[in-house]
Image (cartoon, grey):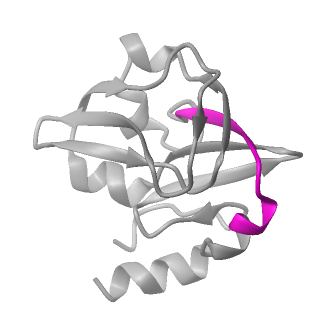
């Protein structure tokens, strides 16, 4: 786990999603730890059209790897602005660059106080060590 990357400028959920706040929007993806646990990602199902709302702790998609299929859980509530179209043809970006080209959604968040329920990078690392 020491070689995994968890940038300090992001917030983290207990379901292994990360969030990067950009004004009143947030970019969401899965953590380096999560992609490492999944193994090679072969398929990502997201709300490609954008538009629908998602609730905090609700499923927004699925990710399939050579090991398993897992649900993607939103760390915040809001309206889905866009999904990463690149993942349709290149799901491996989640493995290669989970915090950059492997992002999944942009959400215009509806309840900024939900950000306070997420963990810092240091808290997330402590959380992972306790698993």
- Compared with residue 62, is residue 21 higher up or lower down, i.e. above or below? below
The mark tally for this picture is 0
Name the residue located 24 percent from the left edge and 56 percent from the top edge: 37
Q: In the picture, residue 64 is in which quadrant?
A: top left
**Residue at (48%, 57%) from the top-left corner?**
57
Q: Where residue 90 sits in the image (x, y, percent)?
A: 38, 17
Q: Nearer the viewer, residue 44 or 112?
A: 112
Residue 87 position within the rendered picture, expressed as x and y whole percent measured from the top left: 43, 20
In the rendered view, tell whether residue 80 sits above or below residue 58: above
Rendering coords of residue 129 (x, y %)? 35, 85
Question: Left or right: 36 with respect to 97?
Answer: left
> Magenta includes 106?
yes
Q: Quadrant of residue 131?
A: bottom left
User: In this picture, which residue range is highlighted in magenta?
Assistant: 104-114
Q: Residue at x 33, y 89 (%)?
A: 130
Magenta-span inclusion, residue 30? no
The quarter in which the N terminus is drawn is bottom left
The answer to whether 16 is drawn above or below residue 64 in the figure is below
Q: Is residue 79 left or right of residue 62?
A: right
């Amino acid at each position: 786990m020491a070689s995994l990357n968890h940038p300090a400028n992001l917030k983290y959920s207990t379901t292994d999603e990360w969030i990067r706040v950009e004004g009143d929007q947030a970019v969401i993806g899965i953590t380096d730890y999560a992609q490492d646990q999944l193994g090679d990602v072969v398929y990502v199902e997201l709300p490609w059209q954008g538009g629908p709302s998602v609730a905090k702790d609700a499923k927004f998609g699925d990710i399939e790897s050579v090991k398993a299929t897992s649900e993607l859980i939103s760390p915040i509530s809001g309206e889905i602005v866009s999904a990463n179209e690149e993942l349709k043809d290149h799901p491996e970006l989640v493995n290669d660059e989970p915090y950059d080209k492997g992002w999944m959604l942009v959400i215009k968040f509806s309840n900024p106080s939900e950000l306070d329920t997420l963990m810092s990078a240091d808290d997330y690392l402590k959380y992972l060590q306790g698993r």
